[in-house]
Image (cartoon, rainbow, N blue to C red):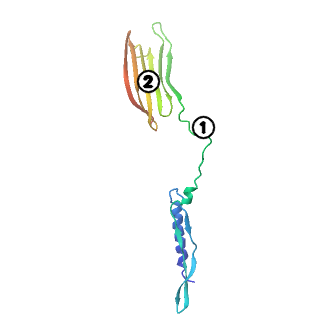
Amino acid sequence: MSGTGAPTEFSARLFVAACAVLLGNGIVVPVIAAPPSIESTATQNGKATSSAISSKASVTLGPSSMQEDTRPTFVPPGDWPAPVNDQEHRLYTLVDVLEFRPKTGAGQSNGYRWDVEGWYGGDYNRLWFKSEGQKGSAFKADYDVDFQLLYGRFIQKYYDLQMGGRVETQSFRGRNVARGLGVIGIEGLVP
C-alpha cells in the first residue's frame, strides 16, 4: 500500500478545521470530517498497481440553523423583582468639616465652621446641596455663609453635570452683603 502522504493531508485538514472552531470568536462552528478511505485508483495492463488513501473532509463554518432554532426561551415568573433596582432614590451626605470653638476671652464670641455636601436621587438624576460657612474665624468678616442647590445629571462614568443657584452672604462690621449667582459645572472623580 503506497500513498503515505494522504493521512498527513487528512490530519492537516482536521487541524485547520479545529483551529476554525477555536478561533470562531465565540460562535460555535460545527466541523464535519470524513475518515480517510482506501481506493484503488490506477490500473496498468489490467492489474491494480497501487492503492491510494484519499480524504474527503468537508468543513462547514458558521452557526447551523439547528443551533439558531434551539435557543432556550426563559420567561421569569411574574412575581420576581427586577434584577437591578436602578429606580431607587437614596440620600448621601458628606460632612467634611464641622467645628465649634468656644469663646476664650471676654470680648470674643463662639466660633464655628462647617463644610457639608450631599445629594438625593437616583443613578441619573440628583438634587445636590452644598453649604459652607464660618463665624468668628481669623478672617475679617464676622460670618460668611455659602449655600448651593443644584440639579445634577449623570453624563459619564464618574461625572455629573450640575446647574442651579448659589447664595452667598457675609457680614463685616455690622454690614450684611448678600448675592445670588447661577452655577453650571461638572463634578467628577478622576480614577
Extreme residue in the bottom direction: 45
Q: Is residue 159 left or right of residue 85?
A: left
Identify the image quadrant of residue 141.
top left
- Which one is in front, 29 or 116? 29
Residue 46, image x, y percentages: 54, 92
> Which one is closest to the eye, mark 1 or mark 2?
1
Amino acid type at image mark 2: Leu
Q: In which quadrant is the N terminus drawn?
A: bottom right
> What residue do we see at 51% from left, 32% from top?
122
Q: Is residue 173 left or right of residue 10?
A: left
> What residue do we see at 56% from left, 67% from top?
32
Q: Is residue 186 left or right of residue 96?
A: left
The residue labelled by disc 1 is: 81
**Secondary structure under badge 1?**
loop
Residue 58, image x, y percentages: 52, 69
Q: Which mark is residue 149?
A: 2
Residue 41, image x, y percentages: 53, 84
Q: Earlier in the sequence, mark 1 or mark 2?
A: 1
**Secondary structure under badge 2?**
strand
Residue 21, image x, y percentages: 53, 62
**In the image, residue 10 above or below residue 24:** below
Amino acid type at image mark 1: Pro
**In the image, residue 160 above or below residue 60:** above
- Which one is in front, 178 or 20? 20
